[in-house]
Image (tube, rainbow, N blue to C red):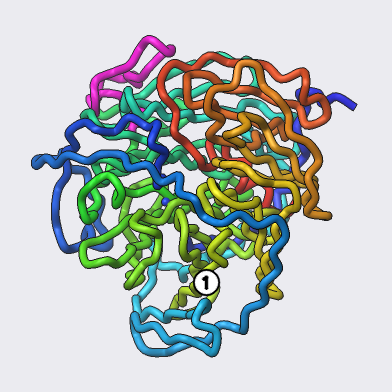
């Protein structure tokens, strides 16, 4: 039966605060000059960083479409992870593909709560059913947006998923930024955009009530439509901007990013204290994974992972599991989970078989990561049994990947198509054609369960899973190189209903 515009009804359950990277295609245009700030230290914990880059470097976008061997059905077992209590050290267990790192960082939040936060409560002591909108609450979806970055324009488009209208556009940096990953908060109020070229991140508010009147003129000065793009730092819906001390160059800038939902506040009828986790490559071969207060931009936690194996790239993709633990995948090589449910926080690292790559990366509602490789099959990893399973018949260059309650959806190149996989049986359902189809890149599921496929060459498709052939095209100017949770749907898929 074809879907309607009435979204899923969410039960406002109390939720604990969870703690929380493109080898990029040779077709991407990233040969411009990049501004960056070089440092060996992370932004000071407990402070907000908002600086303008002052130095420059030039980066080129390599062709990472290698000739890795292709397998159709692969099942590999690994041993249980081995944990070490030494601060920031790594030990190798009987199976060298699995390691666990324990960090000795002290984790606090700005309000003094523990890293996992507290459950949501009401001052009356009783749960209150309310409709905060933006995909949450007990009624129809009030509004929902998809945020699509343009790597060549250094901006991000805000598209209403219900009306299919681009309602605003924002600069993500001073120029030459090559934005490629966006992540939307669970309630749709905020979006973080990662700029891989210049190594910085920007956060925008979706609703006027969350924007800030910085010049004190009594109004919010912000973009009103797709042609109204304010100068960098002039749009008052830009909440914060952080320059990371990354290793420099195009491949080391931040990519993988995910939100944690925060704590549900029944009185305010919204999530409070949401966090952002993202990764970048630091000098010296380490990857840094940082936790940021989502609303203020305060850097709260930095986890150092030495000898990161991402085939020369920063952590490529990020997603959250139902325990609110962030997962990050590399382009090839390893992937990891940040165990924010442990104190001190530990990091568990796995190295996948060579034919399993994670050009696209997501985590499904059962807490299992899925990988879409540009040379090799679509695969998944059972987080409990530590077994890999590849989907027979998937044999293409795959990019973005997302999961809904029934299916996994993958962007295919060669042939250019939308690949549909049965999530439970791990079998191929169909390869759907889009017309036109140039370079299918990003995938995301919106608050009403519609699938969105972004094409690199300047458009996107809104797709009803029950009527794929009836997909609707939306023109979005720019070159779009995006793989992440552009709608917040990945977070919604792991929240209790």
The front one of 302 and 137 is: 302
The answer, for residue 475, to whether it is visible in the render is: yes
> Where in the figure is residue 185, as x and y percent of width and height?
52, 43
The front one of 243 and 209 is: 243
> Where in the figure is residue 340, as x and y percent of width and height?
50, 70
The residue shown at (55%, 37%) is 188
The front one of 488 and 199 is: 199
Secondary structure under the numbered disc 1 in the rendered image: strand
Considering every residue shown, the one lying at the far right of the view is 1
The residue identified by callout 1 is 350
> Where in the figure is residue 19, as x and y percent of width and height?
49, 63
Range of residues picked out in magenta: 215-238
In the rendered view, tell whether residue 320 sits above or below residue 492: below
Assess whether residue 205 is covered by the magenta stretch: no
The answer, for residue 269, to whether it is visible in the render is: no
Drawn side of residue 27 relative to residue 13, left or right:
left
Drawn side of residue 335 relative to residue 73, left or right:
left
């Amino acid at each position: 039966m074809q879907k309607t515009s009435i979204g899923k009804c969410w039960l406002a359950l109390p939720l604990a605060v969870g703690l929380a990277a493109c080898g990029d295609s040779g077709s991407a245009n990233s040969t411009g000059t990049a501004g960056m700030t070089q440092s060996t230290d992370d932004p000071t914990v407990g402070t907000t960083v908002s600086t303008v880059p002052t130095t420059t470097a030039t980066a080129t976008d390599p062709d990472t479409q290698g000739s890795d061997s292709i397998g159709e059905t692969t099942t590999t077992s690994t041993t249980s992870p081995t944990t070490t209590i030494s601060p920031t050290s790594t030990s190798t267990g009987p199976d060298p593909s699995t390691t666990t790192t324990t960090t000795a960082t002290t984790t606090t939040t700005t309000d003094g709560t523990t890293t996992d936060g507290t459950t949501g409560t009401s001052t009356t002591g009783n749960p209150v059913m309310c409709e905060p909108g933006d995909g949450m609450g007990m009624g129809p979806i009030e509004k929902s947006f998809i945020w699509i970055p343009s790597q060549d324009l250094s901006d991000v488009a805000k598209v209403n998923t219900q009306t299919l209208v681009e309602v605003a556009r924002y600069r993500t940096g001073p120029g030459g930024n090559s934005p490629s990953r966006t992540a939307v908060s669970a309630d749709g109020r905020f979006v973080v955009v990662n700029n891989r070229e210049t190594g910085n991140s920007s956060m925008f508010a979706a609703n006027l009530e969350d924007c800030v009147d910085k010049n004190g003129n009594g109004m919010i000065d912000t973009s009103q439509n797709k042609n109204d793009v304010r100068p960098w730092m002039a749009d008052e819906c830009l909440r914060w901007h952080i320059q990371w001390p990354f290793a420099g160059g195009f491949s080391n800038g931040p990519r993988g990013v995910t939100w944690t939902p925060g704590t549900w506040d029944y009185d305010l009828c919204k999530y409070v204290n949401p966090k952002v986790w993202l990764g970048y490559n630091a000098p010296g071969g380490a990857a840094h994974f940082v936790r940021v207060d989502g609303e203020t931009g305060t850097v709260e936690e930095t986890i150092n992972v030495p000898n990161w194996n991402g085939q020369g790239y920063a952590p490529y993709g990020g997603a959250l599991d139902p325990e609110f633990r962030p997962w990050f995948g590399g382009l090839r090589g390893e992937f990891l989970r940040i165990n924010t449910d442990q104190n001190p926080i530990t990091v568990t690292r796995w190295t996948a078989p060579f034919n399993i790559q994670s050009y696209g990366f997501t985590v499904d509602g059962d807490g299992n990561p899925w990988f879409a490789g540009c040379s090799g099959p679509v695969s998944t990893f059972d987080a409990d049994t530590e077994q890999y399973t590849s989907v027979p018949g998937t044999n293409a260059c795959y990019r973005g990947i997302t999961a809904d309650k029934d299916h996994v959806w993958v962007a295919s190149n060669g042939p250019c198509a939308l690949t549909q996989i049965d999530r439970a049986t791990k079998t191929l359902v169909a390869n759907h054609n889009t017309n036109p189809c140039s370079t299918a890149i990003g995938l995301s599921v919106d608050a009403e369960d519609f699938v969105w496929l972004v094409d690199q060459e300047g458009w996107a498709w809104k797709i009803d899973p029950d009527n794929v052939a009836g997909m609707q095209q939306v023109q979005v100017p720019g070159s779009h190189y995006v793989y992440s949770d552009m709608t917040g749907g990945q977070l919604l898929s792991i929240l209790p209903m």
